Every structure is written in structure tokens, then in C-alpha cells.
Amino acid sequence: MDPGFPVLSLLIFLPLLGVLLIALLPGKHTPTDWLVQNAPGNQVDYPKWLALGISLGTLLIALVMFILFDRSVAGFQFVDEFDWISAEAVGFNVAYAFGVDGLSMPLVFLTAFLTVVAVLVSWRVDLRTKEYFAWLLVLETSVLGVFTSLDLIFFFLFWELELIPMFLLISIWGSGNRNYSALKFVLYTIFGSAFMLAGFLALGVAADTFDIREIRHDALAAAFLPAPAIFAFILIAFAIKLPVAPLHTWLPDAHTDAPTAVSVLLAGVLLKMGGYGILRLLFTLMPDVAADADLALAIIGAVSIVYGAVITIRQTDLKRLIAYSSVSHMGFVLLGVSALGTTGMSGAAMQLVTHGLITGMLFVMVGLVYDRTHTRQIADMRGLAHYIPLLGIGMVFAGLAGLGLPALAGFVAEITIFLGAFGSQTAPVSIALLGVLLAAAYILWALQRTFFGPKDEKWAHLPDANHWSEYTIIIALTALIVLLGVYPSIVMDLLEMGVAPIAATVEAAAASASSVAGGG
Amino acid sequence: MPETIFWVILFLPLTAFALAGLSALNQNLQRQLPAWNPRYPGALQPLADQLRGPRLASTPLIIALAVAFALALINLIDSIGLRGLPLEIGAHQLFTAGDLTVNLGVRIDGLTSVMLVVVTGVSLLVQIYSTGYMDGDHGYRRYFAFMALFTTSMLGLVLADNLLMLFAFWELVGLTSYLLIGFWFHRPAAAAAAKKAFLVTRLGDLGMLAAMILIYSRTGTLEIAAINELAEHGAEAGMFAFNGLMIGQTAMTLFGLGLIAGAVGKSAQFPLHIWLPDAMEGPTPVSALVHSATMVAAGVYLLARFFPVIHASSTASDLIAWIGAGTALGAAILALVQVDIKRVLAYSTISQLAYMMFAIGVGGYAAAVFHLMTHAFFKALLFLGSGSVNHSTNTFDMRKMGGLRLAMPITFLTFMLGTLSLAGIFPLSGFWSKDEILIEAWDHNKGVFVLGLLAAGLTAAYMVRAIYMTFFGEYRGGEEAAPGEHGNPDPSHPHESPRSMTTPLIILSVIAFISGFLTFGGEFQTWVYGALPEPHAGKFHWSWGIFLGSTALALVAGGAAFMFMHHRDRVRSWGIDGSSTIPAAQRFATNLFYLDALGENLLARRLFYGGIARVTAWFDAAVVDGIVNHAWRGGLTVASTARFVQNGWVQAGAISIGLGGMIIWIAVVLF
Amino acid sequence: MSDFGFHLAFWSLAAMTLGGASMILISRNLIHAVIWLVMSMLGIAGLYLTLSADFIAVVQVLIYVGAISVLMLFAIMLTPRAERDNAQTKATVPAGLVVLLVLIATLWVAIDTDWGTVREAALTEQARLIGESLIRHYILPFEIGAVLLTAALVGAIALARQDDEDVAVHTASLQAELDGVDSTDPADVIDPPIPSGTSGAARTDQDVL
Amino acid sequence: MLSDVNLLGPELVLLVVGAFLLIADLFVAQRRILMGLAVGALLGSIIYSAVLLSEGHIGNQAFGGVLVVDKFAIFFQILLAGAAMAAVLVSTETLQRTPSRRGEYLALILFSTAGLQLLAGSRDLIMIFIALELTAISQYVLVGFHKDRWGSEGSLKYLLTGAIASAVLLYGMALLVGLSGSTNLLEIANFIAWQGDGRQDALMLAAVFLIVGFGFKAAVAPFQMWAPDAYTGAPTPIAAYLSVASKAAAFAILIRVFFEALGDDLLAEHWKTIFAVLATISMFVGNFFAIRQNNIKRMLAYSSIAQAGTLLIGLAAISADRSELLGASGILFYLAGYTVTNLAAFTVIILVANQRGGSYDIRQYAGLGKRSPWLALVLALALISLIGLPPTAVFFGKIYLFETAVQSGLAWLAVVGAVNTLISAAYYLRPVKAMFIDAAAEDEADAPALRPSNSVLATLSLVTAGVLVIGLHPGLLINAAEAAVAAVFS
Amino acid sequence: MTIGLEHYLVLGAILFAIGLFIALSKKNAVGVLIGVELMLNAVNLTLVAFSRFSPAEIALSTQVFVVFIIAVAAAEVAVGLALALVVYRNRQTISVDRTTLLKG
């Protein structure tokens, strides 16, 4: 639908506006009375209130869009576009084009939502708050941009833009070996985007446009690179981002050393950029190659699932454990898309959303626990549930959601993937089933070692969740996870709308290919 | 009956769960934020206190269950009227993804109706009992929250009309079982047992999950009825085909095996039985409800649900028959050597479930369900009895009990009734259901029959032994309550439990007595057969031979056990330990046939965790990540060394210029 | 000029030129080297004559022999004896290699290529012609050349004269910055840590199930 | 002839004012006035170029075809004058340190700029040579302008290698002249088109010698070794000027010579390979040598080598018929973006060095983000741009150049370039990290914020604006570059 | 045989090589300059030879080229020597293998 004014651009660039405000306004300020109880340290940070306001505004816009989104018509909605670079003579044209469809709409909402969570979970941050929240908002803009770009160049632009805030956020506000982790993250991503850029340009040159909606895969015959090469090039970037084994080792480091909010966003939305890219670009623009690559994708996915899960069991650092579990969970995405059917792809897309919420919540909980215990070593924790029962409940809930418990979001996605993919990818799915058992093993064992067991006087002084921001986060996340678990349609329908055309193209391409093969 | 009723049945306990959960949260919040708990103007204050009090957790649940039970009874009567035939109830679409359509719907037939009554009934009694048993426990509200959630899921499980929904609730009961076993999570044993229970059952669930995705990918449906019809319709030329659905014989067999795997895990059958004894770490009412009456029976229910599927492949049916028979005997033997009364009951449960399993295997569909029902009642009774004993002695160790028949008469009598029923003594319910099964076995599979018969005998023996150690002889003083846990302050003087606990015992014992009579005229069978695709009237089996044989065997074994225990000192003078017959056998048995050690210690800990996982983690750190880091470090080394090429000489620069140029020219000229 | 005379002139001048050049190469003393340079220059001037480029020859003699070499001599005189040796650097061998390549390339091209030569009568009154083309066709390069000479002049003066009021710019720390290859602090962003070889592997074997 | 002088306007302004400055120096003491004169001259030159553009003298040849005024030349005239202006504006410190030679300093900058501008417009080998030497000699002097140990050494190296390189260049020119019998690029092209074949080897040798000569100016590996030393020794404004201006002019003349004179198809194939290989070498050499530098000036020197490599990608791409326009305009676009970016970086560096007593140690930047956040942000922006991350000028330059590579079937080169982005990130991010992440040493924790003078502030805001504008709305510049190269390739 | 263009070209090539070798291998900065001068002369010789063996109008431009080269050479030498002087003042040496402060 067309609201008449560029609501989408507003959504994307509102955070940047917030950055401007934060940069201009003063940092700290002795509170006016009504803020006193809200402001730790008897001082109110304008930055964090601003950040909260802005991110809430963004969330509101996203919500409005989510509601106004016309579920009856396929294709992109809220499209804003105008020519941006038009160099006719040299044939280098880039259009400022943004829009959302069923696939990206939920992800946009997820991003807006998790940014609010990230701001709230950073409520106790008091180191250089101005920059901190500014960078968080920059991050939000870049991710929103990736999810909504309809032009390869802009996709790439936002894809790269996200590096700068991430680098600074991790290496300034991080912990442990943060410089290394931050740079590792940056280098991995740049390595991937090196190939991605080559692939994009090859696409654009062959199709004479960078507009995702206009590139047709039959045009790729003219490409200077063979289509499979382009596919592989772009896949590298997405595989790193997703991440899938063996390109995943940046993830545990980045997660472990990043501040909580960044871990939340990283797991919640940044990884999703990979899965989104696979569906939006690889499968849409090169369905024929995708149709051939299905088995490979499925195997990679299955391997990541099991491999990641097996390693997760050995982790001793709670955050690292969850990070590795992400590797395992994102394997499901590849498995789902490799089914090449609407069911599997919907499941994969659903997995993107649900994993964003669940792992986001896991990181929130771990972060809150870490704020209190100042350790993430599982060995150091014992019987925490006695002293911080509320956090314990949250943690257990998130953990159970993580191991794919029915009536919670994760189950829907995983079961859909399984049901969708088994028919075409029997063996990989059968292997992947192990992941379900292993997931239960590592999560329950971690819970048992940290929250259960006899009391440990060492933790007697710990305060339980006691700040409104913490309650808000936990309640909001719990509500969403349960909602998606018991009434998935609210998102699943959209996602299905989004992926159905993709699946159709893929199937068509596969059919034509087979017919060609049959004819030839 | 309108469909709404069933949703009401489902949502009543769910509401109770919400209330109990809120009250539990509230409890924690109060501790966290004093501001949370303001004073109210006089009139409101008592109300507020009531709302904050623990009863908010239990009372709504009991009321809800009472209503649900009533509705279930009404429905049962209706169902009887329909001779157990299924109601025509459409399903509601939950979500769709491509071709996949996931529905939410209830299937009401004889089987469901019976299960509804059993679940709501037992649950109701157990909850009443729990109000007394858990009184004063810090986690009182949490306990009832979990119980409510469990009951909800269990009801959902029996109501489900499609495999996915069934699986979902199947997992949920697993979860609640996990939460309830680990209820006293400060006990490491409890926490470990909870995890073990969840993982072992989930191992079986994998099979069920595989079966589900298999059947979906082959037939494209998840409707239980459709699948059953397909199976019932039989195979021609290795293909099952019925109104549009098709599936090969092998796939169908695999499907059956997958279901069996799920059932074996849930119902703690060999080799996945290892979790159930440990699960006794949970509160006793939990053991009564979850781990004897309902959840563990869900495995049997599943196979009964898919009875046609199981019998569509002889492989599946034979497999489950033999697994059942073997487990029945083995568990009975293990029960014989336990000193912990709950563990005795746990193994007895395994053994009885095994009965149902092989009943299914040999085609005794109705018999299995019948035994499921009776067993639910008398085994719940027994567990609650043991709980009552524990309530005054603070222990489950029978070596610390004895002579309680005087101190706790009601408990003793009810426990006695339960025992007789379990031992299959005429005319208690256990007798009828067990005989049904034995007759079925005799008709179809002699080998299974023999094992079953032996198990029956052993059952009498170990129960008598338990009774003797608990209620006869002189009292051996119980155990002081563990610090920080409530219990009988003065265990040296045991006393009868409060009425809230004894009442359920009495009611249950009555039911345990009479519920067997439902079999007369094959009425019960008829209702249950109504659930099958091809309903037919059931008939009342009677075989004097088996009646006499089994009863005699039970009496002899029981009597032997009694004499044995009674003259223990003399027996010991023969050089044999009182609690068993042959020391080696005892050791073997007390070590649970070493299955635990094998499964947990060797496979899980050594092979997987210490082996596979360790190697993989090393590989990931040293190779996958190592390559990156080494490349990185290598690059830096190159950078450091490369700098010395720039040695600062003018000529170095000039030479590189000349060399570069010439190399280019030569290259160009040559190529 | 008779053919023989021409031959004689060419070969002797060539010998003189190359000989002078080679002597520069081997002479140990810089001053001698300059003398040899002069000789080689004169030889080239002679060769110009054989090519009947009289004007260039004159310019050659004037500028090289007259100006440049004298300039060099002055420069050398300003440095003490120690700085007047004309030794080779240690890089002689690679230098020789490069030179060999260049020589091969240039000779090959010189001999192998078909230069499409025409032999006409030599230009007459070259001075006038050159002068004319300098102020007609090549006026711009000519002017710029003038600027160039100015710039060179100014620059040379600016460099050579002593300025006492100058303030030193570079700190002594500069050298440390330049030399210190790995003086980067260990926590530097670009240095990966030693891999914790078994991160996630060294574990307490608690119970798993 | 007079009209020709008119066409020469932009350069003439510089030359005249330069000469005047030499004299004015003797009477005028105030630095501001002299700087004002120089800046005025450069502004005048820019305006003059704009006027020529508007008056439509486009395509006119001047001085008998020695010089041509086309959009290509004018693009570079403006770019070079701009760069020179920035260099002059940030030279305050240098001029204060050399009170007695301000006139020379400014005059030489103007002279070399004029030379570079002529280079961009010349169509005659002799003209090229003279222009080249004019810039070279002025730059030799400028590099050594602080007559200290490092400055003089760097300058000496620059001069000696430069002299050798230009001798080689001359030999190449001589061969070319001998073959084609003309010094005019168009006639040479003519000759090659008609009688080029059979003389491949000689042509190639000449071409290679030309590549050596121009590559030296552009600091392309393996002709790059002088660059780091010269940059390090030179006064920082001059380093900035060298890193952008002479690079730009060198690429201008490379495009002119190799695709106006030697653009023949059967040769172009060779150029493609040669430039591709050189690009690869330069990128790797530049980046790897830069990684371990602690002196930010030297680090940027090496990075400029790598950047030259990136530019060569465009040169390699031109040779493919499909993308000749794209490739050339890519080079121009990238050059513009790189110029503003590098100038921004160097400006901040100069400010820091002035406060830090002339130290360029990266570790000196610790805590700068706290002391003077805006300047730190500018430097960070510049470095990010140099990496090639959005939303900056070089980001698009890279995309644009890689596009040309892909179009000309050199996708592998694009990948190599992109991977080098990865290597470069490793060192470009070090100052960023120092500024924003590291805490300043105790003794400097309370160091005062940097106080840029107005002229510096003006420069800084201009170039920063350039970085952002080009990064956010590249369309304008791309079209300009397009138009400029159309002059050469049609 | 007659002395033709090739002779002069060969001569120029050899001279160029010798000059290059001197420039590449001499320790002394002035020595290097000498080498450069030789190279330039070689170029001049080549050019003049070309001018002799080619039509008149070309002959002229090549000779003009030579004139320019000679002038520039002079300028370069002047600046070079000045620089050498500065270096000597700073370092008391003008041998290029000892002026290596800037390296790495």
C-alpha cells in the first residue's frame, strides 16, 4: 500500500536523526524531580532517554507499517524510490529504492523491537553514554537499510555501514579481548563483502541494473562470471554473516566480548541479514543456481547444526555457549531454504524471526546475570535461582524456548523446517534431528549448573531483577515469544507471502532446467 | 456434546496455571520490591492477603479440575451412549506455510473420553492430596502452577486430533515432568534426575518426530484419523492407499517404529527406562500423577491411538510385544530388590506399563487401555500412600520404617487394597485388567504370555515384601527432616496424615476396587473400540485356566514372600541376605542390570562428552579458528619482514624500477 | 668527407665516448671521474658533428663541458677528500643484472627494428631553424622551460643558502617511529592473541546426563 | 596567438603570481599576505578554468597542438588547483618555521601545480617532458624544504631516483619519436594505426619506459620506493600535496598517452595485462608495508601506493572496449574522492603534529577522541573513507572502479582489490582505535584541545564536506567525470 | 659497410647502459648524478641520430627536443648538487648507502 508520504525512509533515517539530537544535546544533567527515581546515580542521561524515545518512535512506525501492511497483495509496499546516480553514458545507474514485502516486514519490526530492548538493557551503561547510544542508533539504521533496500548498491552500502558502529561498540564498551574480537568481526565481514561486491557488480553489469526487482536470472547468461561463481561469491558473505561452519569462528569471540546490548542486536538482527540475503538475493535473483545448489546448502546446514551443537556442549563461558548455539540454530535456516519449497522457506524465515527473539532474550538474561555476578564462567555459578529467582525464571524460559519447546516460538520454525525439508532433503534433515536432542542437552545442562543446585553463599547478596527496564524487557520478550508460539500466523502469513514468489521462481527455474536437461 | 466443552476442559486448568503462576511471581516480587506490597484500607486488606496467600495457587486449580472432571464424566456418559464412536468435530487452522497446514482440533471418542476421566479424576485427587502434602513448602505456589500446566498439557495430549498437536503436548508434558522432577532443584540429585528424564524421553521423542515428518512427507497429512484409516485399509502390493493418500509398507513400518520409540521413551520401557527410577526425586504426588498414572501412560495411549498403524506391520507389533514382555519381567525383578519404597513402585510402574505395551503388541488394544485405567487408579493410590508414609517418617527407605499399620491405619488399609489390586487378586480392578491382557497374550503369543505370567507372580512378591517392610514388624525410627525442608518434626512418633491426604486415598481405594467391573459384558471394550476406524463390540473374556493360574501364582508368590520376610532372621542364618535370594543376582539387580552405567557413564559421559565433543571442540579452536589466526599472524610477519626490503638505499629504489620495467618488457615480448 | 675519414671519425669518437664512460665506472676518484665525463661528453659532441648537428654539438660543449662539469667539480671540492672516492655500493651485482637486461633490450630493439630511415641532406642553418621553431611551434615549452630554470635556480638557492632562523620540525622521536618495526604494543588492535588452543575443550568432566 | 594565451590562462595565473611572489617575498614580511596571494592565484586559476569551460573553448588546441583545453584537462586543472590550495592553506606551520623562504615555498608550489596542470593538457612529448620536469624540480626542492636530516635525505632520494626515472622516460620518448617521427600524440597514434605492426618490440620498449617514468610519478609499485621516504621527510603539507596532486597528474598523463597515443587495439590488450598486474602488485605492496608503520605519515605514504594500485584497476579496465568510458571516469571519480579524503586526513595529522611537537606516532593519537572529538571524527571519517566504507567518497570510488573491472572481464582484479580492502582495514583502523578507544597517557590526559586556525578550519570543513557529499550524492561528480573522459575517448 | 642509424643507436644503447650502471652502483651522490648525465647524453645521441636519418621537418623537432633535454639536465644537476650540499651539512657524508635514516 502507498501511504502517500515516505514513511519507510522516515523509519530508516529516524535513528540517524536521533544520533544528531544526541550529538547536539548535553550528556549528563542533574535530574528534575520526576526523573530522580528513574535515573541511577542521581543523574539523568539525556542520551539514553533520547535513544529510548527515538527507538520507541521507530518501533511505533514499524508497528504502524506492520498493521497497515496489505496482506492481500504480494510484492513490495511502502516503496520509496528516485534516481540517485544516473550515469547513462557509462551505464552505471543506482536508484534510491526502498520497500518492504512479507519477508522483510517482520524482520524490520524485529529490528525496531530489539533496538528498544538493546537500549533498555544498556540502561546501566555509564561509560561515554553519548557515543554509545548514538552508535546503537546508527547500527539500527544500517540494519533497517539492509532489510529494506531494493537496490544492490544500497544493500551493500548499508551492509558495510554496520561495520563501523559494531567495531566501536565492541572495542570500546566490550570486555575481555575486545580489540581482537572487534577487528576479527570487521575483517571477516569485509572479507565476505569483498566477494559479495564482486558478485553484485557482476549481477548488475549483466542485468544492466542494480534494481533487485528488475534483475532477471536469464540475463545472467551474459555475465562475465558464470552464474554459479556469482552465487558462490555472494553466498560467502551471507554464510559468514549467518554464520555457518566453518566460517563461524568470529561469532563466539564477538559475542563473548561484546556488551550485552550489542550481543542482543548481533544475534537478534545482524545474523538475520545473512539469511535474509540468501532468500532475497540468491534465491530470487539466481533461482536456477539455487535449485542446483540445494543439496550442498542442506548438507552445510545440517553440518552446522550438529557441529555447532556438539561444540556448544563443551563451552564453559555462558555467553560463548549461547553464541555457539546460534551457529547451530542458524544452520536450520540453510536447511529450510534448501528445501526450495514455500514450506521450508517460510520455516527458515520464521526461524530468522524466532531465533532473533529467543537468542536475543538469552543474551539479555545472561547480560543481566553478568551485571550481578561479574562472571560468565559456568563453573563459578551455582544455585543462582535461590537468590535471583525472577532472572532464573526468565533464563529457564528463554532456554526452553531455545530448545524448541512447543507453544514457544522456536518450535514452530523448527517443525516447519523439518516438515518442509524432509521430503526433498531426507538425509540432511535426519542428521539435523540430532540437533534437537543436543540443544536440549546443552541448554538443560547449562541451566542445571548455573541456576540449580545447592545455594552458594557467595551470591547471597545478589539483587534480583529490580529495575523497571529489566522487567519491561523480560515481559516484552516473553510475551512475543509466547505469542509467536501459540499464534504463529500473525507473522507466518506475512513470511509466506514473502517467500511464496521466491519459491515459485525457484521451482520454475528448476523445472525449466530439468526440462532442458530432459530435452537435451 | 458441543466442542466448546472440550476447550473449556482444556482451558480450565490453564487458567488455574495462570493464576498460580502469577501468585508465584508475586511471591518473588514481594521479596524483591517491598513497594510491591502496600497496605490497603482496612476492608481490602484481608482480601489482599487472601489474594497474596498460597491458596490462590491451589484452590482455583482444584475447582477447575473438579469442574473439568464433572464435564469429563458427562462426556463419558455421552460417549457411552454413542458406543464410543467419534464425534464429528472440525478442526481450526492454526497456521499454514505453503502446503503445510497445521490445525488445532479435538478428537472425541471412547478412548479420549476414558482418558479424560482418568486424567482429570486422578489429577483432582492428587491436587487435593497435595494441598496437605506440600503444605508449608516454600515452592507451594510454583508446585501447583507446574501441576496445573501439566494437567493442561496432558489433557491436550489426549484431546489432540492430529499428530503435530499431539507431539506438541507430548513435549509439554515432558517439560512439566522436567520441572516437577526438578522441583526441589537445590538437591543436585533432583536437578540431575530432571535433566536425565527430559533428555532420555527426548531421545525417544526424536523417533516420534522422525515418524511425524516421515508420514507428512509421504502422505501430506497429519490427521490421526486419516493415518489410522490408511493403515487399517491394509496394504496391497506393498502400498497402503486410501482416499487419495498413499504410503509404502516400509515407510508405514518405519512410522510405527518411530511411534514405538516415542512410546518407549515416554513410558520408560527398556532400554529407555533408566530415567523413571531417578524421577522419584520429585515430590510424591508428582510421582503419583505424572510418573505412574498419566504421563508415563501417554506412551501406551499413543500406541493405542495408532493401534492400526502398529498392527499394519508385524515387525512393529512383535517388537513392542517382546519389549513389553521383557521389560515387565526385568522391572519386576528389579522391584524385588529395592529398599526405597518409591523405587519399588517406580519399577512396578515400569513393569505394569510394560504389560500394557505387550498387550498392544499382541493385539489386546482394549485390554491395554483397560489396564491403563485401572493401573492409573491403584498405582496413584500406592504412590500417595507411600507419600503419606513419608509425610510422617520423612523417609522413603523401608529399612527405616516398619510397624506403621498401627500408627497409620487408613494409609495401611488403602495401601493394602492398592497392593491387592496391583497383585491382581480377585476381584479387584487389577485382576480384571491383568487377566484380559494375559488372555490376549495366551491367544496370540505364548512366549509373551509366559513372561507376563512370571511378572505377575513377581509383582505379588515384591509388593508383599514392601508391605511387610513398611507396615509390619517394629518401627525403625524414620529419619530427621532434612534441614531447611519442612517435614514431620518428630519422626520417632509417626502419625496418620491429615484428612486432605487421607480422603483421596480412601476415594482412590474405592475406585481401585470397583473400576474393574466395567469390563463386564465387554462394555468398556466396546467404548474403546469405538475409537478405531472399524469399531466393533467388545466382549468379556473369561478363562478359568488363566484365572486360577494367575491367582494361584500370585497367592503362592505373595505367601512365599511373606513367610520369607517374616522369618528373615532364620533365613539370614542360612547365610542369605534378607532382602534378596542370591547375592550375585542381588548385586546385578541393584545395579539395575548395569544399564544406567552403560548408558549414562560410558556412552554419554565418556564416549560423547569426553570423546567426540572434546575432539570437535579442539578441532574448532585449533583448526577452524587456528587457520584464521595463523593466516592473520602470518600476514603480520610478512608485513614486518617486508619492511626490510625498503632498506633506504637510493639504488634499491632505482634497481627495483629498472628490474620492474625490464620484467614487464620481457613478459610482453615473450607472450 | 671521405668515407674512410668518416669511419675513422666515428669509431674513434665512439671509442672516446665509451672509453670515457667506462673510465668513470672504474676510476676511484670522483674528480677523475668528472674529467672522464668531460672526455666522454666531448666525444659525443664529436659524434653530433658526424651527424652534422652542428648547433647541438656546440650547445653540448658549452653546457656540459663548460657548465655542468665545472659545477660538479665545485660541488666535489666543497666536500672533504674522504667524500671524493667513487666506490661502488654493495648492490653492484643486482645493478649489473638490471643493466644487462636493459642493454639487451635496447640493443635488440636498436638492431632488430626497421626504423624506416631516409637519408636526406642534412639540415642547413640549423641554428636559425631551431630558434624559429622555438619561438613559433615550441613557444610554450620554451617559456615553461624558462620557468623551470627559474624554479631550479630559486630552489637551488633556497636549499643551498644557510637559514639560521629556521626552526627544526622533526622530533627526535621520529627515528624511533621509523625504526621500531614491532614496537607496537601487544594490545594493538591488529595483533591476534596466541590462540587459546583448546578454548572450550579443557573442561571438568561433570555428569552430562 | 593571443587566444592561445587566453587558453593558457589557468596555468599562466599561477606562473605569474608565482614569479611575483618570489619578488614580493623580499619586501613583504607578513605570512598572511603571501599566503593570500598564493591562494588567490589558485582560486583565480580555478575560476579561469571554469570560465574556459563555460565559454566553450572546449577542444581547442593551443600553441600548435602542443596544448589542448578539453574537459579532461579542465577537470584536472580544477582538482589540482584545489589540492594545491588546501596544501597552501595548511602550510601555516611550515611557513612559520621557515620565515626567510616563504616566497620560494609558495612560488614553488604554484610552479609545480602549473606544471601538473600543463601535464594534464599537453599533447606533445616535449611539452609533457618539460611540464613533468617543472613539477619534479619544484617538488624536489619542496620535499627538502626543511633542510634537516630527514627532509634532505628524502629529497635527495626523490631527486636521484627521479632523475634516473626521467632519463629512462626520455629514452622511451626518444624511441617513440624515432619510430613515429613526431612528438605529437595524435600523430603518433596515427602512425601506430598505419604502420605500427612489425615494430611491436620497439613500441613496447618505448611504452614500458613511459610506464616507468609515469608510474614513478604515480608511485606505482615497483617504482614506488622513493615515495615513503620523500613523504616522511617532506613538510607534511607537501606530503599531502604529493600524495594527491602528482598522483592525479600522473594518471591524467597515463590516460592521455596510453589511450590517446597508444590506444591502438592490438596494444591495448597488453596494457590491460600490464596495468592489471601492476595494480595487484601495488595494492599488496602498499598495504603490507603499511601494516607495521607507527608513523602515520609514512603509513599514509604506503597507503597512497596501495591507492595508486586501486586506480590502476581502472586503467586496466579501460582497455576493454565496453568500459573505456567507465574506466576512465572511474579513475577521475576515484581521484577526486581520494584527494578530498587524503587532504582531510593530512590536515588533522598536521594539527596533531603541531601540538605534539612534530610527532607522527600513531600512539600519540590516544585519547584524541576525548580531547577534540570533532577533529577526531573527521580523521576517523577520512580513514574509514580510505578503507572504502560508507558513507564516504572512496566507498563509491571503489564500487565504481570495481564495476569497471568486472565489466572488462577482470572480476578477479575486483576481488583482489576488495580483499586488499580487508588488509588495509587492519592498519587504517589503528588510529581510529587509538583515538576513540585507548586512554591517553597520564601526562597528556589533560592536554588542551586542538585549536585549528581559521584557514585550516576552512580547508577542513571543505574537504570533509567533499568526503561526505561525494559519498552521499556521487551522481554529480560521476557525471562530471563522464563528461571529462568523453573528451579523450571519442 | 656504411655507418648507419643502427651504429649510433647501438652506441647510444651502450652509453645508456653504462650510465645506468654508474647511476645504480655508485656510492657517491655526485657519482650517481654523473651516471644520470651519461644516460641523458645517450638519449640525446639517439635523438640526434634519429633526426639525421629522418625527413627534415622531423629532424628539427627532435633537435629541439635535445636542446630542451640539455637545459633540463643542467637544471637537475644544479638542484641535485645543492641538495647534496644540504645532505652533507646535515650528515657529513654524501654517500647514498649511508644516508639511510628513512627506511622500513
Image: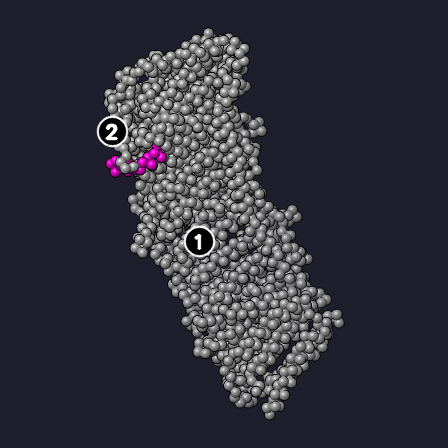
Q: How many labels, in total?
A: 2
Residue B492, horizontal then vertical, whole percent: 52, 10
Q: CA distance from mark 2 to mark 1?
A: 56 Å
Residue C180, horizontal then vertical, whole percent: 65, 55
Image-quadrant location for residue B327:
top left
**Residue furthest front as drawn:** B446
The residue marked by circle 2 belongs to what chain? B
**Amino acid type of the residue that numbered disc 2 sits on in the rendered structure:** Glu
In magenta segment, residue A303: no
Residue at (44, 30) in percent of width and height = B200
Residue A352, horizontal then vertical, whole percent: 41, 42
Does C74 sit above or below residue B218? below
In magenta segment, residue B249: yes
From the image, tell me which residue sits under label 1. A233
Residue at (41, 45) in percent of width and height = A298
Q: Is residue E16 visible?
A: yes
Left or right: A473 as drawn, with respect to D297: left
Does B272 sit above or below residue D140? above
Region in magenta: B239-256
Nearest to the observer: residue C106 or residue D21: C106
Nearest to the observer: residue B432 or residue A227: B432
Residue D58, horizontal then vertical, whole percent: 43, 73
From the image, tell me which residue sits under label 2. B88
Image-quadrant location for residue D291:
bottom right
